Image (cartoon, rainbow, N blue to C red):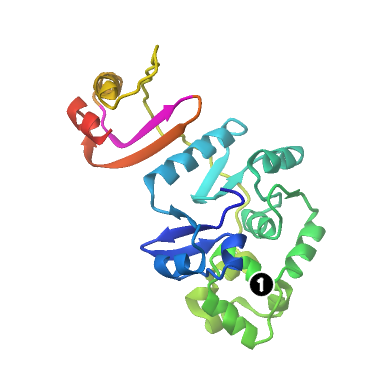
Amino acid sequence: LKDHALITLKKDKVQHASPKAKRAGVVGGMSLSGARSKCHDLAVVETDNPTLQNSWDGVLSQFYALTDRVESPRQGVAYLDLKPEQLQTLATMFSARVAGAWTLEEAHALALGLREGEACVPTKAQAHKRLDTMPIYFLKGLGLNARALTRLGWMGMERLGDLRSWSKPQLLSYLGKDGAALSSLLYGPYRTNVSVYTPPVTVDAHYNFETPALEPYELEGVIKHLAARLLERLAERSASRLALKATSSTVHFTNTKLARQPLRDAGTIERLA
């Protein structure tokens, strides 16, 4: 989906839009129907979709293979404790914006000013210079909303460095709770350590077809068999999420569902699958 007009959606409202979608006139807060009227070939991702969370958990597991220090405050954002020479490799592997810094707050802000697949490891002086010259609208990625951006524009504030002359009480008095993201970046408290990552506990079961399955009924017995194997591996535990993956030479399908009740019997697993 990298080159598609892509939006993320929550409760039928656009949360984020890719550059291609923005060029078509799609903006945050727009309804899905309004976005589709601007761009007919939109690709839509629900941010509360369990499949999306499952995919993000998979990315975090790949990060965990590099270091046991991994944190993710939300989907799409992760903090890792890595050596400087590892950053560009990470950026290239995941087409990600990767920045190294002395605090998590600075690293996050610096990454917002990079391109996909780009990494930077500035000195402290270079980091402060980059941040001071960064347009304030880049900080939407930290949670700075449109209302705060507009109010800062009224005061002639265009770059992060313009705010250095303000005290923390002044900033919060002017922006209220909308200034929380800027406050933590400018005044702290700062975080310098990444917590140890605890991977989610999972159990899995697989089945390989010896001959191609061409009819839906051929899957029913397999799903029943896999449900029984999963129950056996769960032992006395229960699960809350079920991911189903099917792969062939031409198709890769993944779907994840959240269970309305704990998955602790084969029948419930089978029906959810």
Q: Is residue 117 visible?
A: yes
Q: Is residue 247 magenta?
A: yes
In the displayed orientation, state which residue is furthest to the bottom.
Answer: 154
In the displayed orientation, state which residue is furthest to the front.
Answer: 214
Is 254 or 200 nearer to us in this picture? 254
Which quadrant is the C terminus positioned in? top left
Looking at the picture, does residue 16 appear above or below residue 272? below
Residue at the image position 43 percent from the left and 40 percent from the top = 54
Looking at the picture, does residue 159 appear above or below residue 174? above
Helix, strand or loop at disc 1?
helix
Q: Quadrant of residue 216?
A: top left
Is 234 or 14 nearer to us in this picture? 14
Q: How many marks?
A: 1
Q: Which residues are magenta?
A: 237-248
Kind of residue sitting beneath label 1: Ile
Q: Position of residue 152 (x, y in %)?
A: 62, 82
Is 197 or 217 nearer to us in this picture? 217
Q: Is residue 62 magenta?
A: no
Q: Is residue 189 visible?
A: no
In the displayed orientation, state which residue is furthest to the top.
Answer: 210
Q: Position of residue 112 (x, y in %)?
A: 66, 59
Q: Left or right: where does residue 155 sit relative to residue 250?
A: right
Q: Residues within 10 Å of mark 1 (few under 14, many from 20)?
A: many
Residue at the image position 72 percent from the left and 42 percent from the top = 87
Q: Position of residue 240 (x, y in %)?
A: 29, 38
Q: Position of residue 69 (x, y in %)?
A: 58, 38
Magenta stretch: helix, strand or loop mostly = strand
Q: Which residue is mark 1?
A: 136
Is 68 or 265 nearer to us in this picture? 265
Residue at the image position 71 percent from the left and 52 percent from the top = 101
